[in-house]
């Protein structure tokens, strides 16, 4: 048998150790940690959407949650998530939006959970790449994960505001893949800019980072969340190097 005829031999796959994963993910975690919804200052949370928080110890997440496919293969996990959902619905009877305190399962779409469909939530968590990615990373860096059930509100047009050195660098429409929900007249642009400036003034005294990104729902003028600068989608700007001014 010639060298060309020899069967291809691949080395055995060796999964990374927990310590290797921890080191590989440390930089991103350090960027994300200050923006976690559950850790924001009360004065910042007051500007945002009312939310109920439920903490799950990592000791439970590690063996139980990461091996789930849709939640139903682990009845204890499925039941616990649904029970938290029902508890949140007592506070927010018109419906809730679910996320971890880091990210949401937007790869499942934007879902309004009510008593009629709350049992779909575990499947959406464990069928979401975003959720499982965050769970897999966070188990190496914190003692618990945090489930967030947020009061369902109609946000209207959403905008992403980029802050560099504690000053607004640019504002873009968030849902840039779809047509705008309204015409961006000079009056509308000015209203968004004024609301962004007001939120900036309220956030800066209570937030440690100089560079960050925050999202606004303009129907209520509400702060949706704060995200890391440089890791968040630059939306209509296309890249962080292009962020300058207002893009709608």
Image (cartoon, helix red, strand yellow):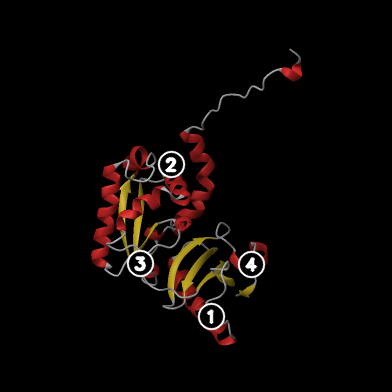
Work out how far the residue at label 4 is from the one at label 2, CA to CA, in angstroms. 33 Å
Which is more foreground, mark 4 or mark 1?
1
| Residue 230 horizontal/vertical position (percent) | 58, 58
Q: Report the mark closest to the observer, 3 or 2.
A: 2
- Residue 187 occupies quadrant: bottom right
Q: Residue, x 75% and y 20% (percent of image)? A: 4
Write down the residue under mark 1. 182
Residue 246 x/y as whole percent = 61, 75
Q: Which residue is mark 3?
A: 42
Q: To which residue does mark 4 refer?
A: 237
Tag 3–tag 2 contact (CB < 8 Å):
no
User: In this rendering, which labeled residue sits more in front, label 4 or label 2?
Assistant: 4
Indicate the secondary structure of the residue bearing disc 4: helix
Compared to residue 137, the image places residue 114 above or below, namely below
Q: Residue at x 62, y 68 (%)?
A: 236
For the residues labelled 3 and 1, the Cα–Cα distance comes to: 33 Å
- Between 60 and 212, the one lying in front of the other is 60
Mark sitting on residue 140: 2
Question: In the rendered view, would you say 175 is above or below 98?
Answer: below
Q: Along the line of sight, which residue is nearer the eye, 160 or 79?
A: 79
Asked whether residue 5 appears in the rendered view, the answer is: yes
Q: Earlier in the sequence, mark 3 or mark 1?
A: 3
Q: Earlier in the sequence, mark 1 or mark 2?
A: 2
Q: Is residue 129 left or right of residue 177?
A: left
Alpha carbons under labels 3 and 2: distance apart:
27 Å
Q: Residue 80 location, x and y as percent?
A: 26, 49
Tell me the SS state at disc 2.
Answer: loop
Q: Earlier in the sequence, mark 4 or mark 3?
A: 3
Q: Residue at x 65, y 71 (%)?
A: 244
Q: Quadrant of the C terminus?
A: bottom right
**Which badge, 4 or 1, is on the more N-terminal residue?**
1
Tell me the number on the disc at residue 27. Answer: none
């Amino acid at each position: 048998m010639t060298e060309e005829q020899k069967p291809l031999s691949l080395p055995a796959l060796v999964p990374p150790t927990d310590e290797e994963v921890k080191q590989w993910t440390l930089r991103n975690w350090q960027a994300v940690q200050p923006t976690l919804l559950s850790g924001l200052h009360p004065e910042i949370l007051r500007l945002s959407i009312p939310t109920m928080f439920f903490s799950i110890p990592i000791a439970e997440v590690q063996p139980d949650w990461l091996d789930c496919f849709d939640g139903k293969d682990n009845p204890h996990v499925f039941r616990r998530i649904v029970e938290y959902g029902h508890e949140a619905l007592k506070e927010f009877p018109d419906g809730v939006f679910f996320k971890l305190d880091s990210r949401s399962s937007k790869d499942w779409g934007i879902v309004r959970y009510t008593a009629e469909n709350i049992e779909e939530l575990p499947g959406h968590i464990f069928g979401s790449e975003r959720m499982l990615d965050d769970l897999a990373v966070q188990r190496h860096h914190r003692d618990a994960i945090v489930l967030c059930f947020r009061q369902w509100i109609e946000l209207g047009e959403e905008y992403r505001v980029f802050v560099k050195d504690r000053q607004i660098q640019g504002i873009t429409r968030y849902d840039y893949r779809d047509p705008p929900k309204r015409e961006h007249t000079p009056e509308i642009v000015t209203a968004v800019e004024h609301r962004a400036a007001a939120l900036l003034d309220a956030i800066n005294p209570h937030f440690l980072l100089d560079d960050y990104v925050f999202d606004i729902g303009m129907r209520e003028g509400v702060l949706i969340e704060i995200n890391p600068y440089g890791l968040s989608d630059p939306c209509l700007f296309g890249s962080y190097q292009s962020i300058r001014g207002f893009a709608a």
